[in-house]
Image (cartoon, rainbow, N blue to C red):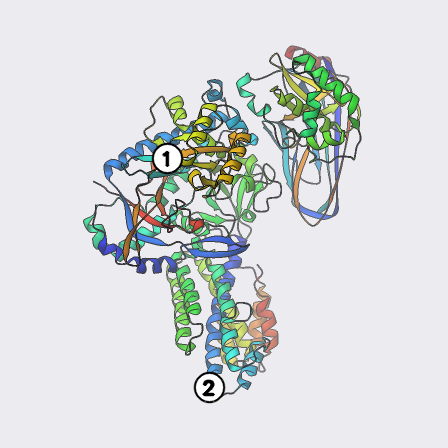
């Protein structure tokens, strides 16, 4: 168990004023068997506080800025007890069908099939994970700007470069080719940076987090915000607006060890 | 009074305007058509000038064909009727299928007239359908506001046309009064000041037709 | 058979009246929008009371099972656990929407209006052709046709006991009210350039609902609102939406939808508005899932299916694939992703090359196709140039879900005007008939 504090700041800049700007934000972590949220808050500027909700992918906040504006900001903060158990207990296998299917972003093509061919056919579980992670570590170049939000795993595999989203998509594709249920996870990682993505694969009835980008298993330095079948299911921000403007988006994330009052830490322990 | 959306308010208003435009312009056309029998081509000029529409017509036959039936001519009777139809068919739940059917019938009547040597007979059918439509809207639409929005559209259009045609002051004055009564029975937004000014202009010794046109066109804010 | 000569004499008059009331459907031809009249044939399809009782039992049963299936798929997924339906037919289907996982629609109803397509074989038995659980259309046509037929020949209806069908609006309204979460009722249309716009506007008129497009509705404070011109607004409790799932909400489904309402799905998921039909139903009316519906009936209801599917084979199963290859020439093959009569091919009508190409495709993507025996339809007579001639026809029955499932005592009978065609869809030139259910 570890207490982590986080802050997330999203900034949208529009090239011209926009209005009726509807947004859905997935930036606050929720309670799960492996993590407990001690405090969390979200503020948006401009506009009324967003409506809170929750769906199959996790917590979300939604709202609308009706008046004309040319910038939008969301600020999320809180503290979380992480790594309360190793991997979240998964639902029964027969409910995991959606996580076994390919999606447009994770469907394999020639490039991914070639990668798959270099992994032993009989590799299972931990060994399979290790082999995939090794392969990605050796061959995949981390190159921000070389891909975009809609780049498929196959496209990224053909170029063998990209960011955490692309590496995760390739890994999901490789796992699904072997019938292993797996999920795309979005969240925050210790230190300063932006939102991060990794993979959860089913192992012995639990979702085990694996971070191919950093070539390691997910540990107590990770806060999970949402999970889906691929990146399209759970973007941090999704919006539509009126106005002929282009949008520039950037986000900043910081995670650090929290000084948690005893009382709250106790709550975390109880959950353990 | 039920809630009527912005879109439907706009459509009701324009349904009133276009139905009136078709009705009045067909009657005006009849007068010009009569003069054309003697080959008086100047009557086309006068007709276009009075309605403030471009005279694009090359002959008497061309005028009859394109002013009445050309769907590409934005000023044609068919174009105006089609606009009325476009509004009517999307107002079925506000005004009822029976009302909509008369605008539909007017479209069929109009289309069946093409190439007919005596268009005035057929145009009478179009006028009959529009009169039936108005009668029916008055009779069966339960919501007073809905009913009156159509009528305001009709009154605005008529005043606009009469002022363009520079009809005698008594006609203008009567239309202004009818509009003033009607608009107060709707939830349409307008400036009372504008309405008062219209009354003054209509009552003045020398009728300021152009000012009336400008004012009445911008009266209703939708 | 009832005597309908008195009525059919008036076929032309009735069609004229249908034109008068703007009974049309829209259609894009070479990218240009056109409105077309829907040709009406006055000889009704007649279903005896006893025959209908059987249909009614079967249709209720089928729709109940389909509702259970959708709820199960977006919930516990027991039918997968018990291996009645293979999971790839569900979660890989374009109709499955992961966003709907865990959603519980008001009163647990997913398919409020189901359009079930049937055909009658020569021996009188009925077969289900297709389930339509998304936005089935067509009820308005027989509704208004009946109104006009009664005007045309009152005597025909005096001498024949025909069950009322103009009560469709009342049934629909009761289904709307049953799930209403508090507020007014609206029918959401994509706009007048939709093929079924006449129906949208006619049903709005007859149910007393507001007909709206997306721009008149907004989400605020977790609720859906209908906005008036004068600034007043009213909460919406039921949306009978005639927009497909994809375009309903750019925040949950297709982001490029300009006709949807942002966040309407969120309001629905929180139980603050009813959407009929519920998004996600496409998972149950897929042509591939159709094969499994009889099994669903046994699984969820513990009953034998009253109505049969047309004999269907899934090339996905090797045994069925063998059969399909063997009997290729006597089967009709359907692409599961297509609708509206498209993607349907007859084995017998293919050239040698086409056949070889098709079989190669079938081997490559077996999950994409189903194969069916060609049913020997019972043709229905239509009047053509004053003469009765037989044509292929199907029946779309409508089942509405309120407190209980209700089967409308009528239906849309569509026929092919082309004597050689099996395709009855209006978009491909078909016409329609009234459907009479006799009251005795």
Q: Chain of mark 1?
A: C
Q: Which of the 4 image quarters holds residue A22? A: top right
Q: Are marks 2 and 1 on the same chain?
A: no
Quarter of the picture holding the N terminus of chain A:
top right
Most distant residue in the front direction: C352
Left or right: residue A142 versus residue C75 is: right
Nearest to the observer: residue B91 or residue A100: A100
Crowding at mark 1 (Cα within 10 Å: few <14, some 14-19, many 20+)? many
Q: Residue B64 got which mark?
A: none
> Mark 2 — residue?
B37
Nearest to the observer: residue A241 or residue C291: C291
Crowding at mark 2 (Cα within 10 Å: few <14, some 14-19, many 20+)? few
Most distant residue in the bottom direction: B38
Nearest to the observer: residue C186 or residue C111: C111
Regarding residue B79, the answer to whether it shows in the image is yes
The structure residue drawn at horizontal position 31% and vertical position 60%, both measured from the top left corner, is: C13
Residue C47 locus on image (x, y percent): 26, 41
- Secondary structure category for the residue under label 1: strand
> Mark 1 — residue?
C128
Q: Marks 2 and 1: which is nearer the front?
A: 1
- Secondary structure category for the residue under label 2: loop
Regarding residue C273, the answer to whether it shows in the image is no
The structure residue drawn at horizontal position 65% and vertical position 25%, both measured from the top left corner, is: A173
Residue B176 locus on image (x, y percent): 51, 72
Q: Chain of mark 2?
A: B
Q: Which of the 4 image quarters holds residue B202? A: bottom right
Residue A93 locus on image (x, y percent): 55, 17
């Amino acid at each position: 168990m570890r207490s982590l504090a986080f802050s997330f700041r999203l900034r949208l800049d529009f090239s011209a004023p926009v209005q009726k700007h509807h947004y859905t934000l997935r930036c606050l972590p929720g309670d799960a068997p492996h993590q407990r949220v001690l405090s969390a808050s979200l503020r948006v500027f401009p506009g009324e506080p967003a409506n809170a909700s929750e769906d199959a992918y996790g917590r979300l906040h939604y709202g609308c800025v009706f008046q004309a504006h040319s910038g939008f900001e969301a600020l999320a903060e809180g503290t979380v007890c992480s790594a309360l158990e190793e991997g979240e207990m998964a639902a029964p296998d027969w409910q995991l069908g959606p996580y076994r299917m390919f999606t447009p972003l994770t469907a394999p093509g020639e490039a991914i099939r070639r990668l798959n061919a270099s992994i032993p056919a009989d590799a299972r579980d931990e060994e399979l994970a290790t082999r995939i992670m090794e392969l990605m570590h050796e061959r995949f170049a981390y190159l921000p700007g070389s891909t975009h939000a809609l780049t498929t795993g196959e496209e990224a595999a053909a170029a063998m470069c990209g960011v955490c989203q692309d590496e995760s998509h390739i890994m999901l594709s490789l796992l699904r080719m072997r019938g292993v249920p797996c999920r795309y996870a979005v969240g925050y990682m210790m230190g300063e940076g932006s939102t991060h993505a990794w993979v959860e694969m089913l192992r012995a009835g639990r979702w085990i987090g694996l971070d191919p980008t950093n070539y390691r298993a997910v540990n107590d330095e990770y806060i999970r915000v949402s999970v889906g079948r691929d990146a399209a299911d759970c973007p941090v921000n999704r919006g539509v607006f009126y106005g002929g403007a282009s949008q520039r988006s950037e986000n900043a994330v910081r995670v650090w060890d929290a000084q948690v009052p005893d009382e709250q830490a106790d709550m975390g322990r109880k959950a353990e | 009074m039920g809630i009527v959306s912005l879109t439907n308010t706009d459509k009701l208003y324009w349904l009133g305007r276009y139905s009136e435009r078709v009705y009045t312009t067909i009657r005006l056309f009849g007068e010009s058509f009569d003069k054309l029998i003697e080959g008086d081509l100047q009557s086309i000029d006068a007709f276009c000038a009075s309605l403030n529409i471009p005279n694009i017509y090359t002959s008497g036959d061309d005028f009859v064909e394109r002013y009445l039936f050309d769907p590409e001519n934005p000023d044609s009777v068919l174009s105006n009727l089609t606009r009325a139809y476009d509004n009517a068919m999307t107002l079925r739940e506000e005004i009822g299928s029976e009302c909509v059917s008369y605008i539909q019938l007017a479209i069929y009547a109009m289309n069946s007239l093409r190439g007919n040597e005596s268009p005035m007979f057929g145009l009478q059918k179009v006028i009959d359908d529009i009169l039936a439509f108005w009668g029916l809207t008055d009779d069966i639409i339960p919501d007073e506001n809905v009913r009156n929005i159509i009528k305001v559209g009709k009154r605005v259009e008529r005043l606009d046309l009469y002022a363009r045609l520079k009809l005698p002051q008594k006609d203008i004055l009567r239309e202004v009064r009818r509009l003033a009564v009607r608009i107060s029975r709707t939830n349409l937004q307008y400036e009372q000041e504008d309405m008062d000014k219209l009354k003054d202009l209509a009552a003045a010794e020398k009728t300021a037709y152009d000012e009336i046109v400008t004012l009445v066109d911008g009266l209703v804010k939708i | 058979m009832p005597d309908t000569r008195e009525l059919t004499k008036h076929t032309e008059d009735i069609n004229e009246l249908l034109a008068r009331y703007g009974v049309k459907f829209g259609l894009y031809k070479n990218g240009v929008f056109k409105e077309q009249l829907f040709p009406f044939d006055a000889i009704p399809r007649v279903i005896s009371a006893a025959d209908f009782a059987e249909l009614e039992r079967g249709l209720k049963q089928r729709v109940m099972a389909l509702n259970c299936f959708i709820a199960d798929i977006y919930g516990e997924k027991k039918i997968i656990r018990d291996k009645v339906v293979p999971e790839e037919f569900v979660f890989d289907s374009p109709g499955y929407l992961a966003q709907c996982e865990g959603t519980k629609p008001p009163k647990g109803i997913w398919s409020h209006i189901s359009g079930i397509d049937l055909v009658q074989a020569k021996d009188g038995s009925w077969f289900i052709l297709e389930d339509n659980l998304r936005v089935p259309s067509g009820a308005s046509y027989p509704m208004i046709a009946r109104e006009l037929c009664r005007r045309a020949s009152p005597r025909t209806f005096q001498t024949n006991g025909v069950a009322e069908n103009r009560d469709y609006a009342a049934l629909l309204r009761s289904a709307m009210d049953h799930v209403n979460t508090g507020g007014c009722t609206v029918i959401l249309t994509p706009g007048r350039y939709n093929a079924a716009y006449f129906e949208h506007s006619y049903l709005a008129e007859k149910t007393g609902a507001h007909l709206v497009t997306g721009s008149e509705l907004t989400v605020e404070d977790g609720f859906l609102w209908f906005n008036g011109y004068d600034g007043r607004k009213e909460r919406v409790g039921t949306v009978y939406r005639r927009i497909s799932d994809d375009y309903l909400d750019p925040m949950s489904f297709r982001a490029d939808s300009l006709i949807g309402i942002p966040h309407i799905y969120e309001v629905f998921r929180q139980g603050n508005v009813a959407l009929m039909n519920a998004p996600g139903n496409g998972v149950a009316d897929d042509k591939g899932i159709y094969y499994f519906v009889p099994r669903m009936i046994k699984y969820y209801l513990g009953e034998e299916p009253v109505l049969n599917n047309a004999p269907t084979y899934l090339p996905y199963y090797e045994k069925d694939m063998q059969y399909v290859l063997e009997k290729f020439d006597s089967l009709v093959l359907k692409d599961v992703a297509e609708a509206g009569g498209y993607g349907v091919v007859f084995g017998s009508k293919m050239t040698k090359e086409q056949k070889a190409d098709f079989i190669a495709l079938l081997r490559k993507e077996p999950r994409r196709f189903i194969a069916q025996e060609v049913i020997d339809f019972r043709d229905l007579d239509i009047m053509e140039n004053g003469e009765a001639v037989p044509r292929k026809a199907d029946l779309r029955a409508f089942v509405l879900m309120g407190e209980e499932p209700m089967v409308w005592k009528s239906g849309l009978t569509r026929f092919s005007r082309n004597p050689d065609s099996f395709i009855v869809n209006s978009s491909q030139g078909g016409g329609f008939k009234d459907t009479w259910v006799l009251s005795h």
